[in-house]
């Protein structure tokens, strides 16, 4: 059974997608951007502030789906500067605690919104 989720308090999607899709016992979270609920970029030149906003937004998605960071199975992290990995790792640890999801880091030239430095997508267990 497939169910699309649009989460209150998140910016409207900028394209033809939804915040997440539930399918069976899995939740597929779209790439989460560092935007506030009014679609404004948070921390324009600060990857740490952007990462914090990304994970705050992801928490809203996880809460809406009835799951948590401990149930995140896999993340894909997109960074415009892969050297920023060390700067965002403490933020990841803050949100994931002792849980360690499988993870892939991809360096990109740009992201969908000018000024974005980081975006994260996830696959999450619902049980």
Image (tube, helix red, strand yellow):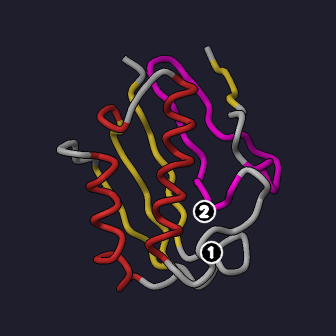
Is 23 in front, or is 87?
87
Residue located beneath label 1 in the image: 116
Q: Horizontal placement of 41 versus 100: left or right?
A: right
Classify mark 2: helix, strand or loop.
loop
Q: Is residue 80 magenta?
A: no
Q: How many marks?
A: 2
Residues at marks 2 and 1 touching, judged by CB atoms closer than 8 Å:
yes
Quarter where residue 6 is shown: top right
Disc 2: CA contacts within 10 A as few (<14), some (14-19) or many (>=20): many
Residue 30: image location, x then y, percent: 60, 47
Image vertical order of residue 55 relative to residue 41, above or below: above
Residue shown at 40%/51% (left/top)?
75
The residue under label 2 is 34
Image point (66%, 80%), residue name: 115
What is the span of residues highlighted in magenta in the rendered image? 11-36
Marks 2 and 1 sit apart, C-alpha to C-alpha, by 7 Å
In percent of width and height, residue 104 lies at: 36, 62
Point out residue 108 in the picture as x, y percentages from the top left corner.
Answer: 54, 79
Residue at the top extreme, as displayed: 1
Q: Residue at x 36, y 38 (%)?
A: 69
């Amino acid at each position: 059974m497939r169910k699309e989720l649009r989460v209150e308090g998140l910016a409207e999607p900028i394209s033809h997608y939804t915040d997440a899709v539930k399918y069976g016992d899995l939740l597929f979270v779209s790439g989460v951007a560092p935007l506030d609920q009014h679609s404004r970029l948070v921390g324009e030149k600060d990857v740490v502030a952007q990462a914090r906003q990304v994970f705050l937004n992801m928490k809203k998605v996880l809460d809406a789906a009835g799951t948590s960071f401990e149930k995140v199975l896999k993340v894909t992290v997109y960074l415009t500067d892969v050297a920023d990995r060390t700067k965002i790792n403490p933020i990841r640890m803050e949100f994931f605690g002792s849980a360690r999801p499988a993870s892939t880091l991809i360096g990109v030239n740009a992201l969908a919104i000018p000024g974005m430095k980081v975006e994260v997508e996830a696959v999450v267990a619902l049980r």
